[in-house]
Image: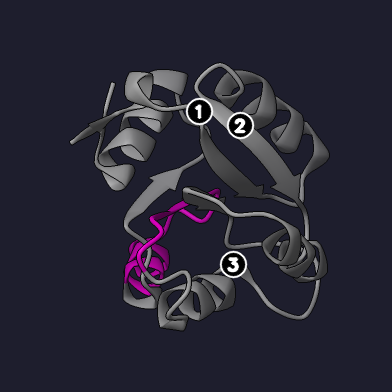
């Protein structure tokens, strides 16, 4: 396991279309991660073009013609990004939603609302980083 304390902050891209959720996630994760936020497939691709990330936190519902599941599939099918962990954080709470996210390639599936410690633990576990 790699310790976060051994390196600079890991970079996380939050893909979330709700402004309040964006701000909340940015505030709570800012201590542990270098945070970037986007709200749609368009801004997602812009972020990928200009930045490198160590982990993705993606909601199923986002703006645009593609949903988070499509973005997860694209990440996991890309030679450049396939080894970057993806955590799905969503309000979609049905068993089928979890199955679909994991089938798309998500490394973890979490349901909103979530406690900070549970989110942080899931991110560290998906990234295989020590706390």
x, y percent for residue 51 = 68, 54
x, y percent for residue 60 = 58, 62
Closer to viewer: mark 3 or mark 2: 2
SS at mark 2 in the image: strand
The residue under label 1 is: 9
In this rendered view, identify the residue nearer to me: 87 or 2: 2
SS at mark 3 in the image: helix
Q: Quadrant of the N terminus?
A: top left
Disc 2 packing (10 Å; few <14; some 14–19; many ≥20)? some
In this rendered view, identify the residue nearer to me: 48 or 60: 48
The residue under label 2 is: 34
Q: Quadrant of the C terminus?
A: top left
Q: Earlier in the sequence, mark 1 or mark 3?
A: 1
The quarter holding residue 47 reads bottom right
The residue under label 3 is: 68
Disc 3 packing (10 Å; few <14; some 14–19; many ≥20)? many
SS at mark 1 in the image: loop
x, y percent for residue 33 = 54, 29
Residue at mark 1 to residue at mark 2: CA–CA distance: 6 Å
Q: Which residues make up the magenta segment?
A: 83-102
Disc 1 packing (10 Å; few <14; some 14–19; many ≥20)? some
Residue 131 drawn above or below residue 105 = above
Residue at mark 3 to residue at mark 2: CA–CA distance: 21 Å
Question: How many numbered badges does the structure rendering display?
Answer: 3
Q: Residue at x 33, y 62 (%)?
A: 95
Q: Earlier in the sequence, mark 1 or mark 2?
A: 1
The reply to whether dot 3 and dot 2 touch (C-beta < 8 Å) is no
The reply to whether dot 1 and dot 2 touch (C-beta < 8 Å) is yes
Q: Residue at x 75, y 29 (%)?
A: 23
The quarter holding residue 127 reads top left
Residue 122 drawn above or below residue 60 = above
């Amino acid at each position: 396991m790699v310790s976060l304390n051994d390196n600079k902050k890991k970079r996380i891209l939050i893909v979330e279309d709700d402004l309040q959720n964006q701000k909340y996630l940015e505030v709570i994760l800012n201590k542990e991660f270098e945070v970037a936020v986007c709200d749609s497939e368009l801004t997602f691709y812009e972020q990928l073009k200009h930045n490198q990330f160590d982990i993705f936190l993606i909601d199923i519902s986002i703006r645009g013609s593609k949903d988070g599941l499509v973005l997860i599939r694209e990440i996991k099918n890309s030679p450049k990004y396939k080894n970057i962990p993806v955590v799905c954080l969503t309000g979609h709470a049905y068993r089928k939603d979890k199955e679909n996210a994991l089938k798309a390639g998500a490394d973890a599936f979490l349901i909103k609302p979530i406690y900070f410690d549970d989110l942080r633990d899931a991110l560290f576990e998906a990234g295989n980083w020590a706390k």
